[in-house]
Image: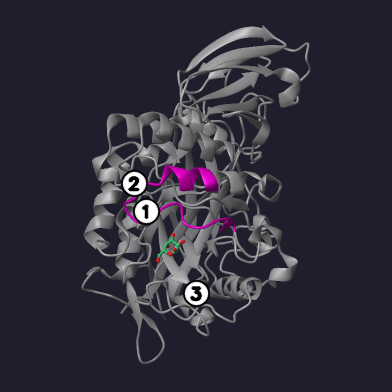
Amino acid sequence: MKTYSIIILGIVVASLSFPLGSKGQTPHSEIHAADDGLALTPPMGWYPWNEFGEDPQNEKLIKEIVEAMLTRGLKEAGYSYVGPDEGICFARDATGKLTTNLARYPSSLRGLGDYIHKKGLKYALYTDAGTRTCSKAMPGTKDHEFEDMATFAEWRADYLKIDWCNAEGQNVAKSYAKLHDAQHAAGRPIVHSLCSWGEGEPWKWAAAVGHLWRTTEDICAPGKADWARAMKITTANEKLYEAAGPGHWNDPDMMIVGMDGLSEAQNRSLFSLWCMMAAPLIAGNDLRKMTPSTIQILTNLEAIGINQDPLGNPGHIVRREDKVEIWAGKPLFDGSQAVLVFNQGTVPADVKVRWTEIGLKESASLYVRNLWTHRTTGPHNNDISVRVAPRDVALLRVSKTNDFPVPPIIVADRYLLSFRTTSKEAQKLTGTITVKTNGSDELPLWKVRQGLPSWLSVKVTKNGKSQRLINTVSTGGLKKGSYHAVVRADNVEATSGKSLSALYYDVEFEAMTRR
Ligand code: GLA
């Protein structure tokens, strides 16, 4: 008679939601990627390419960046995905399987994933839909789609950037659709970040096969922040605002905030534009060497609250006058509206924003919160006047009430659980995940989605300022092997009762035969 010991290897907050343990393949034509519950708000994280390019990428760098995410408040602000971009991470062996470049990643790419999960973050990897990656230093997935997706799942990736180099003769939509199917077959939910730089107009079809898609060329060459190019990209991306929403995002590329050559006002402007466009907030700077101003910009929770708003509306330009743009069209979950005034000129601009041009009634009496100065004024009737410094912004939240919500950002810390049993009988095992809020006094209510497997039940209890989620796992009926369980908790905004984005607890565990 076999008995089993269960070791829960790690619990991370991850954006996941496929039927648990399902190996069933859903044809991509029948599913909107948004329906899978991944990336309901724009992904937040860090990738090395903009600052480092390929060469210095290795395990030591990624671990130092992870450390910086934890100690500089980025994790708390919601940044979670982290991992290597192109940088000679893996090769293909004689059997066709991807193998880690152990010289650069001595713990192996699976080991690095486990490390990142243990830190309570999510694991991002990079690959290519063609035969080789852009530098040609690594194999692409072409004709290895299913085995490679199985390997990325085995390495515990949560997010995959899929480039489009060396793909001559391939159909872009079909190539990414095949990778989507391959990922479903592999059984691990992974955010797909399509990187065809706008080739094939992914905004027209990619929502069915991925969660975000690059709309443009690269924002810069490695190590060289390029303001003019960033503005060109913004102009192109803004036009596509109707294509994006929860689970499917336009991606104007990783940010250049905090890279050499940009002023504080430019950093603030770029960040505000990305927030307003509901663009993925993937930092691209060296997080180990940030000025206090860069940290303050990247972790401004009120600005991030605009980006991560659960309605997921990307804003757009409603008026352009000379060098000044007024951005609006971004209603937020609490009934307020985000407005951005961007002055690209070299002299200060005095700008009047009329309620009618941002879709509100002329007679409305409204409060205005400046999300960079964190001050509220009002009520204002008909309009508001703001002075905006050169190449700077005013990022505003306009509301009927003088009651601006605490940013709906929930941070769940990692609690590594280790459950063991030596009994021959099925046993009940219990572990606890504590969820903390960042900013609120008390967590709103939690709902647990039905449909968990019978051996996993989740109870929610309230415990002062935090609530406790209790997993009760029974070994009954489990066979030896690796398991991937997803616990979904939907968050409800405390006062309005509206749904906020869901959190998913990604539980990896092995059931092993005891001797
Ligand atoms: C493309 C992508 C970049 C980066 C490089 C790596 O250019 O757009 O973001 O991943 O490939 O070679």
Query: From the image, which quarter does the C terminus lie in?
Result: bottom left
Residue type at mark 1? Asn
Badge 3: how crowded within 10 Å, few (<14), some, or many (20+)? many
Q: At numbered mark 2, what does the secondary structure look like: helix, strand or loop?
A: loop
Give the residue displayed 28% in from the left and 71% down from the top.
Answer: 108
Sooner in the amino-acid sequence: mark 3 or mark 2: 3
User: Is 439 above or below relative to 78?
Assistant: above
Q: Does ligand 1 reach within 8 Å of label 1's beta carbon? A: yes
**Mark 2 → mark 1, Cα distance in angstroms:** 7 Å
Q: Is residue 140 magenta?
A: no
Seen from the viewer's position, the closer of residues 75 and 19 is: 75
The amino acid type of the residue labelled 3 equals: Met
Marks 2 and 1 close (CB-CB < 8 Å): yes
- As measured in the structure, the alpha-carbon distance from the residue carrying label 3 to the one carrying label 2 is 28 Å
Q: Which badge, 1 or 3, is on the more N-terminal residue?
A: 1
Specify start and end residues of the magenta stretch as a single range: 211-232
Per the rendering, the mark at residue 149 is 3
Say whether residue 279 is visible: no
Q: Earlier in the sequence, mark 2 or mark 1?
A: 1
Mark 2 crowd level (few <14, some 14–19, many ≥20, 10 Å Cα): many
Q: Which residue is mark 2?
A: 285
The quarter of the image that holds ligand 1 is bottom left
Depth check, mark 1 against mark 3: the one in front is 1
Q: Residue 229 got which mark?
A: none
**Residue 234 or residue 65, whichever sits in front:** 234
Q: Residue at x 51, y 68 (%)?
A: 476
Task: Tell me where residue 475 appears, x and y as whole percent.
Answer: 47, 66
Where disc 1 sits, the SS reads: helix
Q: Position of residue 477 (x, y in %)?
A: 53, 71
* Residue 302 seen: yes
The quarter of the displayed image where residue 311 is located? top right
Q: Would you name the residue on which mark 1 appears?
A: 50
